[in-house]
């Protein structure tokens, strides 16, 4: 079986004679598998290089964004990567996220108001149709939508 394996040799000097010395790594590789293994390793190397290039592009983009944020905050370029600046950026990011959540909640409220406001007059008071009732006395009131709803809300301020 040893004859079917690919052996590696290196040249070593033994005194004044240079001779090939077998460098056995503990695993024999079949000669017939050599090209497949080399090809596989080369492909893995290409993939690793592509991943490295991608990480480099992401790093460069993140660095550029960090510089833009630092400039927007009025921070000198040499001070843009200090822990204080990074902390401030994290705080601003948290504030931005909170504002985004608030905007989404306000959008939902605005959508609900638009639906209540756009109920046609002929459907006001129909069972199962959501609408707004404005009381005019202890046992009386009227359903409103559109401009009347806007006026009722303004009057209640």
Image: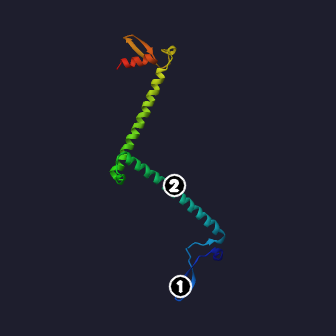
How was this image coloured?
rainbow
Task: From the top left corner, tell me how far across and down residue 155 is, in percent.
Answer: 36, 17
Would residue 30 appear left or right of 64 to someone viewing this image? right
Q: Residue at x 47, y 24 (%)?
A: 114
Q: Choose mark 2 or mark 1, whichever is in front.
A: 2
CA gap, disc 2 to disc 1? 45 Å
128 lies above or below 26: above
Disc 2 on helix, strand or loop?
helix
Task: From the top left corner, tell me how far across and down residue 72 is, in percent.
Answer: 38, 45
What residue did someone put label 2 on? 54
9 lies above or below 132: below
Task: From the top left corner, tell me how far across and down residue 20 is, in percent.
Answer: 58, 82
Q: Quadrant of residue 31?
A: bottom right
Comparing 2 with 15, the one in front is 15
Quadrant occupied by the C terminus:
top left
Q: Quadrant of residue 154?
A: top left
Residue 13 marker: 1
Q: Residue at x 42, y 34 (%)?
A: 103
Disc 1 on helix, strand or loop?
strand
Comparing 80 with 3, the one in front is 80
**Earlier along the polypeptide chain: callout 2 or callout 1?**
1
Would residue 102 appear left or right of 27 to someone viewing this image? left
Disc 2 packing (10 Å; few <14; some 14–19; many ≥20): few
Quadrant occupied by the N terminus:
bottom right
- Number of marks drawn: 2
Q: Residue at x 42, y 37 (%)?
A: 100
Q: Residue at x 64, y 68 (%)?
A: 35
Disc 1 packing (10 Å; few <14; some 14–19; many ≥20): few
Residue that sits furthest to the bottom in the current view = 16
């Amino acid at each position: 079986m040893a004859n079917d394996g690919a052996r590696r040799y290196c040249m070593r000097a033994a005194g004044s004679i240079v001779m090939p010395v077998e460098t056995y790594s503990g695993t024999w590789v079949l000669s017939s598998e050599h090209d497949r293994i080399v090809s596989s390793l080369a492909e893995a190397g290409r993939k690793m290089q592509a991943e490295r290039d991608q990480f480099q592009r992401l790093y460069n983009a993140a660095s550029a964004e960090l510089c833009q944020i630092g400039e927007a905050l009025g921070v000198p370029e040499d001070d843009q990567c200090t822990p204080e600046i990074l902390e401030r950026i994290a705080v601003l990011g948290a504030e931005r996220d909170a504002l985004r959540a608030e905007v989404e909640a306000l959008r939902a409220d605005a959508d609900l108001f638009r639906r209540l406001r756009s109920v046609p007059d002929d459907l006001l008071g129909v069972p199962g149709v959501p609408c707004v009732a404005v009381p005019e006395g202890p046992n009386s009131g009227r359903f409103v939508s559109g401009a009347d709803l806007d006026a009722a809300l303004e009057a209640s301020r």
